[in-house]
Amino acid sequence: MAERKYHVGLAEGEVGGYVLVPGDPFRTKLIAEHLEGAEEKAWSREFRTFTGRVGDELVSTCSSGIGGPSMAIAVEELGELGAHTFIRVGTCGAAQPGIRLGDLVVVTGAVRSEGTPDGYVPCEYPAIASHDVVAACLEAAAAAGVTHHLGVVRSVDALYSDLLPGTMPRQEELRAELKMWARAGVLANDMESATLMVVSALRRWRAGVLLVCVDELDAGEIHHVDPALMHRMIDVAVEAVRRLIERDHAAARQ
């Protein structure tokens, strides 16, 4: 039997080159419904993986769990098994008043307010999405007619200090920080995007991020998104993968 990776529980041949990465392991099952012939390959810890096809190409979905540490582990082990293109399919809290529940955010880069990438490289190294992944996500969102926003997000380690800063010991500092990043044009906050982009860039893999808003500005609560809105985001992500596959195949023929 082929040796399985310690954390994700996967072996060679069970992962496609293109991987959609949600945080929630139950969301991988939803994503699998949008792939052709998808089968569950492993569920180890927070990492649940299905692999199917988009056209003739193997495509997987593997959950990362919450936060940067588990995201880094997922990307490292998936990449060792042959994955080369990652799209995070996640949720975010809006940092701007014009972003509404259910809107999509196509991420160009992330503020590194979390700690995991610091173990790889100093904070001066930027968390930037791959241009071709961003382009594919933008085109897919536009083709679907979905309201979407393009720009920089901020990744954090502590969810509730952002969500409920008034309950924290350093509430004045936290509120000031949130306002500062909003004035700087940050669109939304999440917990995994910066880690995905930094680790992927260092390993020479492609990465992008597509998020759905589940927390409007100053709402102070996270909403369970209508399943139809989640499926809509997944449709956009799968279409983005389809476009990337077509372009990669065309480039290989040249």
Image (cartoon, helix red, strand yellow):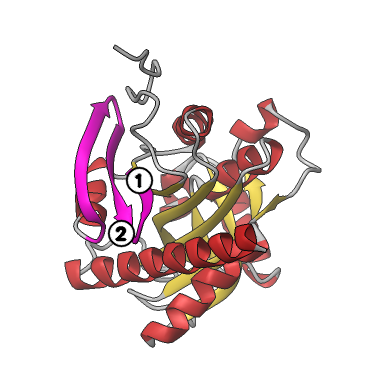
Determine the residue positioned at 66% across, 46% down.
112
Label 1 element class: strand
Q: Which span is picked out in magenta?
A: 34-61
Check the image and name the residue furthest to the front: 253
Q: Is residue 39 magenta?
A: yes
In primary-sequence order, the first of circles 2 and 1 is 1
Determine the residue positioned at 52% across, 27% down.
80
Residue 167: give x, y in percent of width and height.
42, 47
The image quarter containing residue 247 is: bottom right
Tag 1 residue: 60
On screen, residue 161 above or below 250: above
Residue in front for this viewpoint, 46 or 170: 46
Q: Is residue 108 visible?
A: no
The image quarter containing residue 215 is: bottom left
Q: Is residue 82 magenta?
A: no
The amino acid type found where label 2 is placed reads Ile
Contact? badges 2 and 1 (CB < 8 Å): no
Residue 88: give x, y in percent of width and height.
45, 52
The amino acid type found where label 1 is placed reads Ser
The image quarter containing residue 200 is: top right
- Residue 227 left/right relative to 195: left
**Predominant secondary structure, magenta span:** strand
Q: Is residue 112 visible?
A: yes
Residue 147: give x, y in percent of width and height.
42, 83
Tag 2 residue: 222
Determine the residue positioned at 42% across, 72% down.
104
Residue 130: give x, y in percent of width and height.
65, 57
For the N terminus, the image quarter is top left
